[in-house]
Each structure stands twice: as C-alpha cells, then as structure tokens.
Amino acid sequence: MHRAAFCLLLVVGISASVCAAGSFVVLENTSSPDGRYAFAWAAPEKYKIDWAALNRGEMTALPNSDDFFDAVINYLVDVKDGKILATFRGAQAWQLPDGSHGNHRDLEVAWSPNGVFAVAIYSLKWQYASFQGFRITPAGVATVEIGKPLETAWRQHLSNTAGQRYKQRADSLAISFGELKAMETEGSFAVHAQAEIPKSASQDDAFEEKLVFTLEPKTEAQLSLEIRDMAKSSRPKVLANRAPEHRNFNQRRCPRFASVGM
C-alpha cells in the first residue's frame, strides 16, 4: 500500500454575524447536531419574494423572473436567532415546498460532534463547485477554503503515484468530492475524492481515494486547513452513531422550511 502524507495550511479571518434584508429558507439535512445552525438559501431583495407565503407552501410567492434561481445564495445561518452568519461562497442550492429543486445543484454537509465545525460541498453535474469549512465562535464564523487546496494536493499525489496514466488525462478530469464523514477527532473529516473523464466507461479514466483533513483553529478569529493523509486503501475511523448530514435530492423527506424575517 502506497501512503503519502500531506500537510497544507491555509489561514483566513473571521466573518462577524451580518443581517440581510428579507428572509431565508433552511435546507433540509444541513442542521447542526443541536439544530441551532443550518445552511439555507436566500435571494437578493429585488426579487420581492413573499417568504411567509412561501413557507406556507404557496408557489405564487415566487417571482416570475427567469434569472431568479441563478441569483440564489447559500448561507450558514443561526436558526434560533434568525441571523445569517456567513456566506457559502459559490453555492446556489435551493428547494421549494412542492419538492422541486435545482437540477444538478447538490449540497452535502457534515458537522463535528459538538457542532462547532462544519464542512459543506456544493456540486454540479460532474464536479464540485465549492468546498468550504466553517468554525462557529462567539465572535462570529471563521471560514477556510477546502476545495482548491485539497484538489491541488490530490492532483500532485496522483501525479506521483499514478504517473503517466494520470498525466495523460489530467486536463480532461472532472474532480468531485462526496461522502463527507465526521471523525472522532474534533474538527477532522474524511471525504471521498473522485477524478474522472465525464461519460467515459474506461476504468483507466477514473481515479478515487479517501482523503482526510482537519480544520484547525489558530486563533479565535482564524481557521486553517491541514490535509492529513492520502492513501487509497485507508479507512479512517468515523463516528459510529451519527451519519453525516447531506443533501440528497433523490431520497427526500418532506422539506423543513424556516422563514425568518431580518
């Protein structure tokens, strides 16, 4: 078994709580263990959405504008206090009371056991679009980019371990991440990484690996990413009693909506 260890640190500042005009709708299967925090979608005020009516299941509350869903923004929110805490940059997942949702707009979320750390992946049809980490503190929310540094480190790993098979296909590969799992160590997570040439049926055109990373607080206002391990046959120990929370549009319960005025 070939094992390679990587350590990459990124540090970013904190985002204080902000208030936004209008309301938000909580996305199902994204809430923290205690239910206080979750991920939600909202839209710019110019669209004049009747959030209360939408919460009652009235589809007429939505605007007729063709570009409405392209303007959706995802946030980390405090459900209890009705506050938007941080923006999930580049993410546009949404769902409506009638069960409709964005086509190939998938959101997967996992929380640490104490609900302090969260990681979220927003994916399109073939690849991820945004992958971000969050740490909730009394001062606000510290965030860190996960996707690009994790992809860069993994591509380097593939170049070293798969050689020409990877190098000949590198520019054609679509990268996706999924199957997020919180590990027993607070702030540590495992994720399944896949690189493939879209629509190819050849096994030579696909690569996959289990990756492990940790969100490390450097100060109250700073969060860093440490990429721990890349090993094809590794099976990190995950929490036995808590499945990772994720957005699955194909197996949906009745959506839980929260309309909160700001």
Image (cartoon, rainbow, N blue to C red):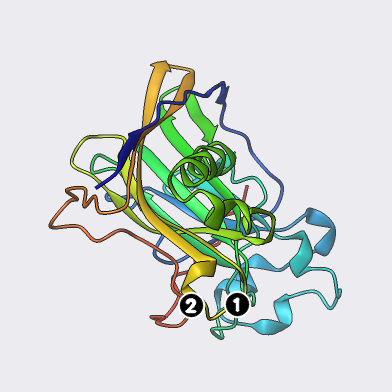
Q: Residues within 10 Å of mark 2 (few under 14, many from 20)?
A: some
Residue tagged by mark 1? 101
Residue 37, percent from left and from top: 41, 47
Q: Residues within 10 Å of mark 1 (few under 14, many from 20)?
A: some
Pointer 2 with pointer 1, Cβ within 8 A:
yes
User: Which residue of the protein is positioned furthest toward the left in this rendering?
Assistant: 240
Residue closest to the eye, 39 or 150: 150
Q: Left or right: 257 with respect to 169? A: left
Picture disc at residue 234:
none
Looking at the rendered structure, the kind of residue marked 2 is Phe
Quarter of the rendering containing residue 161: top left
Residue 170, percent from left and from top: 63, 54
Residue closest to the eye, 215 or 152: 152
Report the residue at 24% width, 61% height from top.
243
Residue closest to the eye, 103 or 28: 103
Label 1: element kind: loop
Q: How far apart are the two marked residues, 2 and 1, measured between alpha carbons?
A: 8 Å
Looking at the rendered structure, the kind of residue marked 1 is His
Q: Is residue 213 above or below residue 119?
A: above
Residue 31, percent from left and from top: 38, 55
Say if residue 174 shows up in the picture: yes
Report the residue at 61% width, 79% height from top.
199
Picture disc at residue 249:
2
Q: Earlier in the sequence, mark 2 or mark 1?
A: 1
Q: Left or right: 1 with respect to 229? A: left
Label 2: element kind: loop
Report the residue at 54% width, 44% height from top.
155
Report the residue at 40% width, 43% height from top.
118
